[in-house]
Image (cartoon, rainbow, N blue to C red):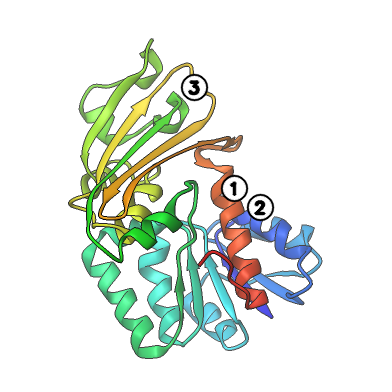
Amino acid sequence: MRLLIIGSGAIGTTLAEAIQEMEEFDIFYITDKNEDRARRIASQCKKAKFISPTDESIKAHLKNVDLVVEAASQEAVQHYVPIVLGMGVDVLVMSVGAFADDDTRERCFNVAKRKGGRLYVPSGAICGTDGLHSASSDVIDSVELTSTKGPKSFQDNEYLLSKGVDVNTLKKKTVLFEGPAREAVQHFPKNVNVSATISLIGIGLDKTKVKLVCDPMCDCNTHRLEVKGEFGHIVCETDNLPFPSNPATSYLAALSAIAAIRRIAGNVWIGI
């Protein structure tokens, strides 16, 4: 198999290192607007080749690619995913917050249906999505997500700055946001891919309730998922260690992508 990684940040780098060791892939490509960084990663992996981030270059290589992994940004999802799916190629999306935009979501989902390319979204930095997915087959009364992170995860956030909130001055655990997932994704695009994922699986962006908490004593990213419905009651809490190079991203998010790629490549899905 052959794979293309779009993005060379913390997750893209981790994926490249993992794919280098997978027997299922004989070659993989990597691209990024930060060409120097992507070239550097490609030079460190024997199976990897850098390709230019231009549409022409990517389209040319898609003819020989079995799977594309987006690990760049919501903007990358909006631009590249329709192109990939339009050529009938499968794509795994990490920046799932992009699907909080109704037009982007409908466009990508419709292209996938028409052209046959599969669109995968891994569980990311939270556990319990399998149970939520099963519960969605019947009535779900409520879905609530509480995400707690340290100040570094919320630094330079435009929404907080507009409210006059300086997370570096906080002395105790503080609720920064409480409301529907749609607003959370809009105000905290770097922090709430988890919110978008559970909303898409469950009862939608407007009914899913999200609370974002900053804890100056916190050294991990914690997600607490609570679901109530006809099936019963789910409470699931995940304590994630963040990437040292990107505190807003949990290491488990990258591991979930690696696990998904292994399942896709091996054609065996357990716990689907």
Q: In what element is the residue under mark 1?
A: helix
Quick one: label 2 or label 3, which is nearer the N terminus? 2
Question: Residue extending furthest right?
Answer: 46
Graded by Cα atoms within 10 Å as few (under 14), some (14 to 19) or many (20 or more), the crowding at tag 3 reads: few
How many marks the image carries: the answer is 3
Q: Nearer the viewer, residue 115 or 121?
A: 121
In the image, 88 versus 218, the foreground residue is: 218
Amino acid type shown at disc 2: Thr
Q: Could you tell me residue 95's position as x and y percent?
A: 43, 57
Seen in the picture, residue 52 relative to 201 is either above or below; the reply is below
In which quadrant of the rendered image does the N terminus lie? Answer: bottom right
How far apart in space, not on screen, are marks 2 and 1 (Cα)? 6 Å
Q: Residues within 10 Å of mark 1 (few under 14, many from 20)?
A: some
Camera-near label (1 vs 3) is 3
Query: Which residue carries the number 3 mark?
Result: 218
Badge 1 amino acid: Ala
Q: Residue at x 69, y 72 (%)?
A: 28
Image spot of residue 252 (x, y percent):
57, 46
Is 24 above or below relative to 189? below
Residue 211 visible (yes or no): yes
Residue at the disc numbered 2: 14
According to the picture, the residue beneath numbered tag 1 turns out to be 10
The residue at the point 58 percent across, 35 percent down is 241
Instruction: Name the residue at 33% across, 75% down.
Output: 108
SS class of the residue under badge 2?
helix
> Depth-wise, is mark 2 or mark 3 nearer the camera?
3
Badges 2 and 1: C-beta atoms under 8 Å apart?
A: yes
Position of residue 254 relative to residue 47, above or below, is: above
Residue 234 is situated, as x and y percent measured from the top left of the image, at: 37, 45
